[in-house]
């Protein structure tokens, strides 16, 4: 493991914002102010055309995103969760098919399997990447297992070489929950293109965020793309099909109303122009955090890149630390106006909605330990170094006994 402990490098110009002010967990107010002329240009174009859902601006964004990711096909939908459901269905998930899912992830990683008609089967995670541990896949395989869904979390990809090896060994289809992974690449290949397909979420806090819900399916498989395109529009593969204009308009599948709206596409097109700069800023801030917090007592783990880091390009969507007295620290920071988030306070196998699957506490100890000890700190391009300093000072004060 290689902890991010590079020498701090400050950006050329830091916005004026004193450390005595509240530090929200997420804000994009400054980014919107900077980008508003371009955003308004795209929004005005939507209004001029008079089509606000699944129109020309969505098609324009799909083309731009395909160029950025290298994906053969991009299908814009109304959320990352819908993208997962649609992708699973488009890849041929049948009722009662089992999908191996890591026990540590957002609820949608597993609930999407149920919504698509399948059954989630959980497996433990690696302690460094927090992603599915390929070595745990064999114990989760049954005669009904058809898919494995690695989830790329926080700043780096799952071990896709290991997942691919296991998928070949057990004849499993790989679908990626790459909702957080825009900009992440494995040997130059973008996340979501390492299995049969993947997804992106554009929830506002994401590295590329909209001003509401939006998502996309990524795939290089034409059959998956055609079915996914139909499923997002009530199962109809015709008329508004941006990428496959010749297909008939009959309703061939029981689909969804999951079209991306053009206002979200307008915002995303504008923000896409800043994506690489925003990624660089996020990674810089992550390094700054690691320098300041690496010797802080009470912090047992800082974000660290896997020993496979040379194979991939990390992107810091979340700066996640493991700490003692996690909940007390979060409350201490909140009283000082510093926002944090807990990822994820209850692992998936212990969620009440999955009680019928029969899992109990102790089944996946690495996931359970992560759920009890991890805390996410503010990290977004608008965060200033004085704000970051204020966060680190408050954490240091807490573990120096200031909370007693």
Image (cartoon, rainbow, N blue to C red):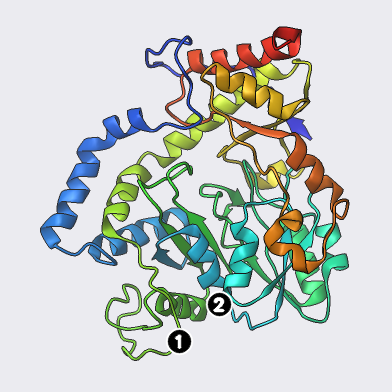
Residue 227 visible to an observer of this rendering: yes
**What kind of element bears circle 1?**
loop
Mark sitting on residue 239? none
Q: Residue at horizontal 31%, vertical 72%?
A: 242
Residue furthest to the left in view is: 48
Write the residue at 61% across / 41% down: 314
Q: Quadrant of residue 4?
A: top right
Q: Secondary structure at mark 2?
A: helix
Q: Label 2 belongs to which residue?
A: 89
Please provide percent x and percent y for residue 303: 69, 32
Please name whichever residue, 310 or 183, is drawn nearer the observer in this view of the structure.
Answer: 183
Residue 288 is at least partly visible in this image: no
- Image quarter where the N terminus lies is top right
Neighbours of disc 1 within 10 Å: few (<14), some (14-19), many (20+): some
Q: Is residue 337 above or below residue 116?
A: above
Which mark is drawn over residue 253? 1
Label 1 or label 2, whichever comes before in sequence order: 2
- The percent position of residue 92, horizontal first and vertical second, equals 60, 81
Whether 182 is drawn above or below 146: the answer is above
Is there CB contact under 8 Å for labels 1 and 2? yes
Q: Position of residue 209 (x, y in %)?
A: 42, 45
Alpha carbon separation for disc pair 1 and 2: 10 Å
Is 98 placed above or below 365 here? Answer: below
Question: As displayed, is residue 92 above or below residue 282?
Answer: below
- Residue 327 lies, in percent from the top left, at 70, 29
The residue located at (58%, 30%) in the rendering is 340
346 or 264: nearer the viewer = 346
Say which quadrant the C terminus sits in. Answer: top right
């Amino acid at each position: 493991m290689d902890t991010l402990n590079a020498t701090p490098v400050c950006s050329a110009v830091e916005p004026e914002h004193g450390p005595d002010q509240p530090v929200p967990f997420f804000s994009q107010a400054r980014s919107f102010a900077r980008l508003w002329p371009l955003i308004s240009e795209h929004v005005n174009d939507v209004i001029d055309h008079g089509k606000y859902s699944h129109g020309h601006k969505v098609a324009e964004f799909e083309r731009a995103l395909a160029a950025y990711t290298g994906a053969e096909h991009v299908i814009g939908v109304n959320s990352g969760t819908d993208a997962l459901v649609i992708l699973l269905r488009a890849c041929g998930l049948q009722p009662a098919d089992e999908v191996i899912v890591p026990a540590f992830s957002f609820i949608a990683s597993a609930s999407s399997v149920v919504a698509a008609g399948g059954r989630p089967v959980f497996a433990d995670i690696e302690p460094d990447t927090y992603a599915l541990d390929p070595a745990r896949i064999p114990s989760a395989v049954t005669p009904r297992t058809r898919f494995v869904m690695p989830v790329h979390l926080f700043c780096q990809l799952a071990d896709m070489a290991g997942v691919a090896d296991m998928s070949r060994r057990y004849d499993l289809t790989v679908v990626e929950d790459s909702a957080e992974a825009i900009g992440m690449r494995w040997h130059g290949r973008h996340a979501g293109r390492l299995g049969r397909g993947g997804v992106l979420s554009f929830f506002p806090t994401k590295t590329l965020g909209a001003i509401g819900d939006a998502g996309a399916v990524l795939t290089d498989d034409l059959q998956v793309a055609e079915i996914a395109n139909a499923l997002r529009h009530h199962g109809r593969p015709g008329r508004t099909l941006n990428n496959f204009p010749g297909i008939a308009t009959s309703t061939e599948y029981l689909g969804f109303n999951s079209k991306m709206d053009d206002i979200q596409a307008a915002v995303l097109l504008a923000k896409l122009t800043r994506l690489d700069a925003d990624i660089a800023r996020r990674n810089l801030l992550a390094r700054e955090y690691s320098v300041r917090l690496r010797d802080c007592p009470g912090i047992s783990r800082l974000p660290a890149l896997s020993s496979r880091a040379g194979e991939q390009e990390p992107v810091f969507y979340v700066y996640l630390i493991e700490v003692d007295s996690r909940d007390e620290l979060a409350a201490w920071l909140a009283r000082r106006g510093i926002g944090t988030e807990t990822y994820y306070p209850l692992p998936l196998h212990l969620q009440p909605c999955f009680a019928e699957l029969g899992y109990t506490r102790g089944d996946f100890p690495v996931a359970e330990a992560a759920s009890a000890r991890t805390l996410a700190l503010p990290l977004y391009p608008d965060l200033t170094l004085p704000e970051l300093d204020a966060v680190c000072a408050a954490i240091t004060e807490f573990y120096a006994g200031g909370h007693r």
